Amino acid sequence: MDAATTSGPTTCLSLLQAGRRGNDRLLFGRSITSTRTSEKHEKFRFKPLEVFGFVRWRGDQYGTQSWRVVVAQAGRPGERLTRIPGVKPGAHLLLHAFGKATAKRALRVIDMLSEAHVLHEIAPAYWRHFHLRISKNKEPEPYDPKVFEALIRARSVS
């Protein structure tokens, strides 16, 4: 990428590959740059409003202790953002699935979504819906882009 593309405000996602201690993986998103800072660390930069998802798990000698699936949207300068570990300066949190069972369910639905849609193009409102449904232990409604386009148009009119 050229300097013009990477200059300006961006959101930085730092991922760790440390074997049993922890592993992170980018699920989806269009980063403008990716940099491997060391053998274990990789950083991705996203333009404002870009949607991205990642998996993070941490473990110790007793096994996996923390499972987390996150879908976030990079913010614009001056916006209030949610602090998310590994995301600087923060982002709009769209989906947070925490715990082994919830994270696995979220990953299954994300896999199904990826078969029919480009994940980073799915409307942020759907990811919020997904979060609410999965936090209530219910299945999310199927994604219909036309429904969410209409929702966006309705909000822009009011």
Image (cartoon, rainbow, N blue to C red):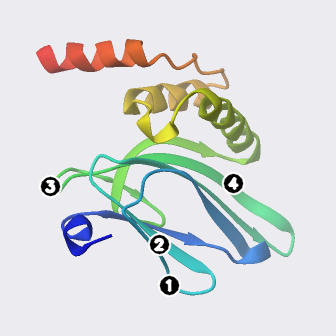
User: Is 78 rendered above or below residue 88?
Assistant: above
Mark 3 or 1, which is nearer the eye?
1
The residue where tag 2 is placed is 43
Label 1 is placed on what type of residue?
A: Thr
Q: Are marks 3 and 2 in contact (CB under 8 Å)?
A: no
The residue where tag 4 is placed is 67
The residue where tag 1 is placed is 37
Label 4 is placed on what type of residue?
A: Trp
Q: Residue furthest right?
A: 62
Q: Are marks 1 and 2 in contact (CB under 8 Å)?
A: yes
Q: Label 1's element?
A: loop
* Residue 158 visible in the snapshot: no
Location of the N terminus by quadrant is bottom left
The residue where tag 3 is placed is 78
Q: Position of residue 128 (x, y in %)?
A: 45, 31
- The residue at the point 59 percent across, 21 percent down is 140
Q: Are marks 3 and 1 in contact (CB under 8 Å)?
A: no
| Crowd around label 4: few <14 · some 14–19 · many ≥20 (10 Å) | many
Q: How far, Cα to Cα, is label 3 from label 2?
A: 23 Å
Q: How far, Cα to Cα, is label 4 from label 1?
A: 24 Å
Q: Are marks 4 and 3 in contact (CB under 8 Å)?
A: no
Q: How far, Cα to Cα, is label 1 from label 2?
A: 7 Å
Q: Nearer the viewer, residue 158 or 36?
A: 36
Label ID, residue 9: none
Label 2 is placed on what type of residue?
A: Lys
User: Is 139 rendered above or below residue 118?
Assistant: above
| Crowd around label 3: few <14 · some 14–19 · many ≥20 (10 Å) | few
In the rendered image, which quarter is residue 126 located in?
A: top left
Q: Position of residue 155 (x, y in %)?
A: 21, 18
Q: Nearer the viewer, residue 54 or 92?
A: 54
